[in-house]
Amino acid sequence: MSFITTHVLNNATGLPAAGIGVELSDAEGAVIATGVTDDDGRIGDLGPESLDSGTYRLRLAVGEYFASRGEETFFPEVTIAFAADADAGHYHVPLLLSPFAYSTYRGS
């Protein structure tokens, strides 16, 4: 299993957000992995099986997702910075999304 996974749910529709491009990068901005959310709004294999402890970022191209649906959005992208501990195991970073708001948390 990948050390990092994500899931995007469109809170406005209550449905998974498929087709969102996601980049995983380190604190210096070097891209480690990329992926696209599947029909269930998930990426289960984003990056390697382990990462060093440190700060990482997920950049989600939500503007393109809303544009493809013909919807306006305030956010061209969402960037989530988080601290990972190499010994803590798997990190699941979900995004709850609507055109004008979002929230995130550490999932399981």
Image (cartoon, helix red, strand yellow):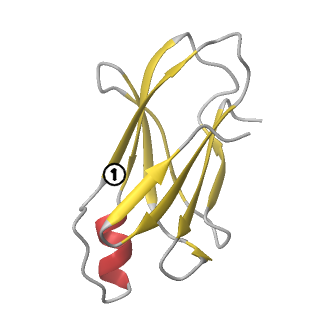
Give the side of residue 24 with respect to residue 66, left or right. right
Q: Is residue 51 above or below residue 48?
A: above
Residue 90, located in which quarter of the rendered image?
top right
Give the side of residue 44 with respect to residue 34, left or right. right
Quadrant location of the C terminus?
top right
Q: Residue at x 35, y 82 (%)?
A: 68
Q: Position of residue 80 (x, y in %)?
A: 40, 39
Using a 10 Å C-alpha cutoff, classify the residue at mark 1 as few (fewer than 14 neighbours), some (14 to 19) or many (20 or more).
some
Quadrant location of the N terminus?
top right
Q: Residue at x 62, y 66 (%)?
A: 38
Q: Residue at x 68, y 69 (%)?
A: 40
Q: Nearer the viewer, residue 18 or 83?
A: 83
The residue that disc 1 covers is 78
Give the side of residue 86 with respect to residue 24, left or right. right
Q: Position of residue 104 (x, y in %)?
A: 50, 47
Q: Amino acid at mark 1?
A: Val
Q: Nearer the viewer, residue 34 or 27?
A: 27
Q: Position of residue 15 (x, y in %)?
A: 61, 78
Which element carries disc 1, helix, strand or loop? strand
Residue 7, located in which quarter of the rendered image?
bottom right
Q: Residue at x 29, y 80 (%)?
A: 67
Q: Nearer the viewer, residue 28 or 108?
A: 108
Q: Is residue 8 above or below residue 80?
A: below
